[in-house]
Amino acid sequence: MARTHLGELFFKERMLRLPLATSRWSGIAISERVLRNLITLLIGLFLVSLGGALIFQLSVSRSAHIEEHNKLSLLYAQLAAAHLKSVLARDIGSGAAQRIPVQEDIEAAIPPFLRAEGRIFAVTDSSGLVRAALPARSDLVGRQLYEILSPREFVPDSIEEGGMRFTRLASGGDAYATVRALDPYPGSLAVIELRSEILSTWRSDVTHIAALFIT
């Protein structure tokens, strides 16, 4: 008798009855198994919606980070171009002939805080040949700008548009770049930032925030 009672207690399918407002119906009966499956389904749907919201928020955060980074890079490009013009103007004011900026000029014109976060500054002459670069990189100096930035996706003549443009480097990597004319001086200033560098800082920020929540 005791075994039979225990079997009914643990293995017998129990029902949950929900009464209805009307007396015509006896109510709705839901088995325990169906109820468990329903709860599991609801938990699954909640987790899926939570994961979708998290992925969407991360996508928005990444886009905002890239946009803010590009705004700073554009501002730095304007400041660097103005500094270069100032350096060259001093030479002309002292009676020196108009010339193309060299490595010493770009190092004097671009302060250290503008060089942070993986940005690349390159000064070209009127033919598009890179004459100087920061950080000092021998793989850039002496090359044409179209050999660095893919000419299919980036047109240096469109500098009047003013924004950082997404482009693919000739080496295959993705980047954002802009070109600033140094008029009335010959040449231009190109500012390039690798997309991988931008996303690296974003991932670091997200990791730090996640660590704060976990701890």
Image: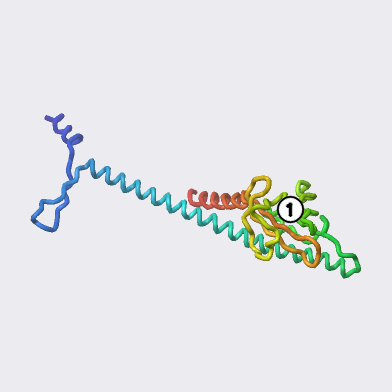
Up/down of 173 relative to 115, above or below = above
Up/down of 75 relative to 120, above or below = below
Q: Residue furthest right?
A: 95
Which element carries disc 1, helix, strand or loop?
A: helix
Query: Depth check: 128 or 88 in front?
Result: 128
Amino acid tagged 1: Leu
Question: Residue shown at 64%/54% (left/top)?
Answer: 153
Residue 125 picture quarter = bottom right
| Side of 108 where 199 appears, left or right | left
| Side of 95 where 65 appears, left or right | left
Near mark 1 (Cα within 10 A), the count class, few <14, some 14-19 or many ≥20, is many
| Side of 4 where 202 appears, left or right | right
Q: Residue furthest left?
A: 24
Q: Position of residue 170 (x, y in %)?
A: 68, 47
| Side of 196 where 123 appears, left or right | right
Q: Position of residue 2 (x, y in %)?
A: 14, 30
Question: Residue shown at 39%/51% (left/top)?
Answer: 49
Question: Residue shown at 51%/50% (left/top)?
Answer: 210
Query: Depth check: 103 or 20 in front?
Result: 103
Residue tagged 1: 145
Q: Position of residue 114 (x, y in %)?
A: 71, 59
In this rendering, the count of numbered labels is: 1
Question: Residue shown at 46%/54% (left/top)?
Answer: 56
Q: Residue furthest front?
A: 152
